[in-house]
Amino acid sequence: GDSVTQMEGPVTLSEEAFLTINCTYTATGYPSLFWYVQYPGEGLQLLLKATKADDKGSNKGFEATYRKETTSFHLEKGSVQVSDSAVYFCALSFSGYSTLTFGKGTMLLVSP
Amino acid sequence: DAGVIQSPRHEVTEMGQEVTLRCKPISGHDYLFWYRQTMMRGLELLIYFNNNVPIDDSGMPEDRFSAKMPNASFSTLKIQPSEPRDSAVYFCASSPPGPPYEQYFGPGTRLTVT
């Protein structure tokens, strides 16, 4: 079945460091891919998405590129802030199927 | 848009009591999802609706759990009777019609059963 694998956390960085959170997926066909962010005590928020190969989703300084050849959708940010501390979820969906398959989440901790 | 609205935000109840969680989806969205999140089990899909009709309730843990969607702007998740192991954060999410089916989550209801 379809699955999403994320790197285990926590990822601990200092402010202004470069961030990469790895996400790979297993699926037949060409899913749409998403990154969600969950701040402490809040619901999941859609951060960015990509719907076809080589698409780049971007938002709030975060970017991710849909790589069909490596079945990956890694999240990157050039300079993290303390306020980016949160749990990040990678997810996928298929056309014709309305549900999302989520990864287990990766906690990011950014220190001043 | 106001986003997905959930109430209450926090609920503390005693074992055996009935609990009702409420959700108002984003206007125009025709899918509604109920999730449960715990440290041990992560994020679990409980049930989802399309155009007010339940499509898949295979994630509902037991018969003690039930969900309804009487109209396009309101859904409830009920637990009767509640047990301590039901303690979790319950999220409602909605999504617009058609792909790519991105979901928009509410702030959640933190349920504590003592």
Image (spheres, coloured by chain):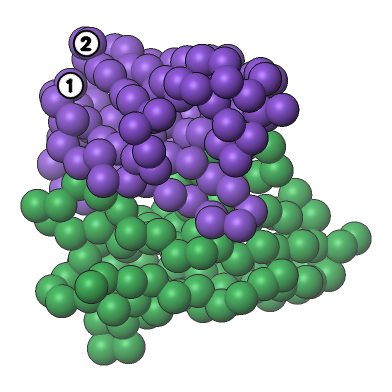
Chain colours: A green, B purple
Q: Quadrant of residue B94?
A: top left
Residue at x 72%, y 28% (from the top left corner)? B114
Please, which chain is the residue tagged with disc 2 on?
B
Marks 2 and 1: in contact by CB < 8 Å? yes
Dot 2 falls on a residue whose secondary structure is strand
**Front residue of A84 and A31:** A31
Q: CA distance from mark 1 to mark 2?
A: 6 Å
SS at mark 1 in the image: loop
Which residue lies under the disc numbered 2? B71
Task: Tell me which numbered mark, 1 or 2, is placed earlier along the sequence.
Answer: 1
Does mark 2 fall on the same chain as mark 1? yes
Residue B38 appears anywhere in the view? yes
Question: Can the viewer see residue B6?
Answer: no
For image coordinates 80% across by 55% down, the residue present is A82
Residue that appears at 66% across and 18% down: B13
Q: Using the image as rendered, state which of residue B71 and residue A44 is in the foreground.
A: B71
Total marks drawn? 2
Lateral position of residue A22 relative to residue B33, left or right: right
Q: Which residue is mark 1?
A: B52
x then y, percent, for residue A95: 12, 55
Give the residue type at disc 1.
Answer: Asn
A30 versus A112 height, above or below: below
Left or right of A12 in this view: A102: left
- The numbered mark 1 sits on a residue in which chain? B
Residue A14: image x %, image y %?
83, 70
Residues packed near mark 1 inside 10 Å, few (<14), some (14 to 19) or many (20 plus): some
Determine the image quadrant of residue B92. top left
Relative to A65, does residue B51 appear above or below in the rendering?
above
